[in-house]
Image (cartoon, coloured by chain):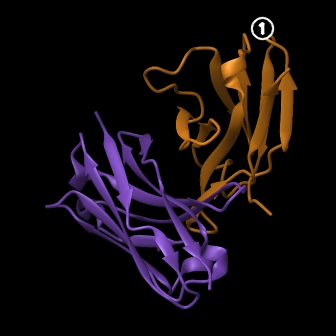
Chain colours: A purple, B orange
Amino acid sequence: EVQLMESGGGLVEPGGSLRLSCAASGFTFSNAWINWVRQAPGKGLEWVGRIKSKTDGGTTDYATPVKGRFTISRDDLRSTLYLQMNSLQTEDTAVYYCTAVVRDIDYWGQGTLVTVSS
Amino acid sequence: QSVLTQPPSASGTPGQRVTISCSGSSSNIGSNYVNWYQQLPGTAPKLLIYRNNQRPSGVPDRFSGSKSGTSASLAISGLRSEDEADYYCAAWDDSLSGRAFGGGTKLTVL
């Protein structure tokens, strides 16, 4: 069974940093392309970025609002994905989900809440 | 303003058939696959349809997807109270080099 578990969310002041983790199991993590998607309170889904598998280049793509501030990385040995978030702004407040694409089907974690507030 | 356009709300009575539309452009729906997601209140989104019209294992065949040109649709037949949820379409956008989501449609079962 595919499982994704996000962690690392919490309260951070504007301008601060936070690192989210996504622990995966139940599939060959190294072969999967992984996305981060966020959802602000009461709002819709917003794609944050993705990282391809190393066999497909391991490259990353980011949404415009987070480009230059957020970095996605992966540790295939630990089956874990990371989202390093710097220069956080109040508009980054959201539940952050990791999603793994396995043979065209994407699986979602339960999400972790990030609150940016002074 | 979302790149993909969905109606903010839809409704139907039990047993009815409801359709939710998703309008895009040549850089997203027109050239890439469309996925649909269901988000029940207080839960994470769940994949309902992938590759325009494919259902993952476990998704009832009451749910179906279609695509034509730069638009896509999700149809739900035999509507049930448990179908009350938010529904989102998504597609890769070649111009943005990113994934585009619709703004979501809140489905109410009357």
Q: Residues within 10 Å of mark 1 (few under 14, many from 20)?
A: few
Q: Is residue B42 left or right of residue A105?
A: right
Q: Is residue B49 visible?
A: no
| Whole-percent x, y for residue A45 in the image | 64, 55
Q: Is residue B106 above or below residue B64?
A: below
Q: Amino acid at mark 1?
A: Gly
Using the rendered view, name the quadrant where residue B6 is placed: top right
Q: Is residue B55 left or right of residue B19?
A: left
| Whole-percent x, y for residue A113 in the image | 52, 62
| Whole-percent x, y for residue A75 in the image | 21, 66
| Whole-percent x, y for residue A9 in the image | 44, 67
Query: At 69% across and 38% down in the image, what residue appears?
Result: B87
Q: Which residue of the protein is positioned furthest toward the left in this rendering?
A: A77
Query: At 72% across and 14% down in the image, what residue appears?
Result: B77
- According to the picture, the residue beneath numbered tag 1 turns out to be B15
Instruction: Compare residues B25 and B108 and report the one nearer the observer.
Output: B108
Q: Is residue B110 left or right of residue B87?
A: right
Instruction: Compare residues A49 and A104 and report the one nearer the observer.
Output: A49
Q: Is residue B15 visible?
A: yes
